[in-house]
Image (spheres, helix red, strand yellow):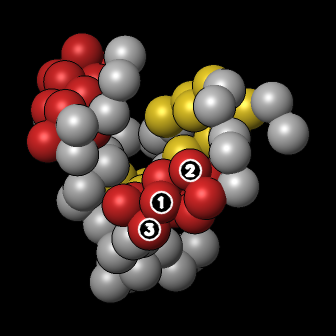
């Protein structure tokens, strides 16, 4: 494994898919547990944060990135 795609979702939505991708820390995925398990297996490569579609018109793309980055900094992740 040389890269991961990290996403967060909110299943409490009423769209056709039954879930909505949201910024890291805004959904139901246990992001800290993911990173803990990646560390446990010695993974030390790329973690790519992905947001397939914006949850709402606002925040815009840059704001959305900043929200996820702030969350990762809170977890003391390296950039």
Camera-side residue of 72 and 16? 72
State the image coordinates of residue 34 (x, y, percent, origin top left).
51, 61
Quickly name the residue at label 2.
Answer: 39
Asked if residue 75 lies left or right of residue 78, the reply is left
Taking the spot 48% from the left edge, 53% from the top edge, the residue there is 35
Quickly name the residue at label 1.
Answer: 36
The local secondary structure at tag 2 comes to helix
Asked if residue 35 lies left or right of residue 12, the reply is right
Taking the spot 66% from the left edge, 26% from the top edge, the residue there is 45
Camera-side residue of 22 and 55? 22
Rounded to the nearest whole Å, what is the CA distance between mark 1 and mark 2? 5 Å
Quadrant into which the N terminus falls = top right
Q: Are marks 1 and 2 in contact (CB under 8 Å)?
A: yes
Taking the spot 32% from the left edge, 49% from the top edge, the residue there is 24
- 10 Å crowding of disc 1: few (<14), some (14-19), many (20+): few
Camera-side residue of 77 and 25? 77
């Amino acid at each position: 494994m040389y890269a991961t795609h990290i996403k967060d979702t909110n299943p409490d939505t009423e769209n056709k898919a039954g879930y909505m991708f949201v910024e890291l820390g805004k959904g139901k995925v246990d992001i800290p547990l993911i990173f803990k398990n990646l560390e446990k297996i010695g993974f030390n490569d790329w973690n790519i944060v992905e947001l397939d579609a914006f949850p709402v018109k606002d925040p815009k793309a840059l704001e959305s990135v900043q929200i996820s980055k702030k969350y990762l900094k809170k977890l003391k992740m390296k950039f």
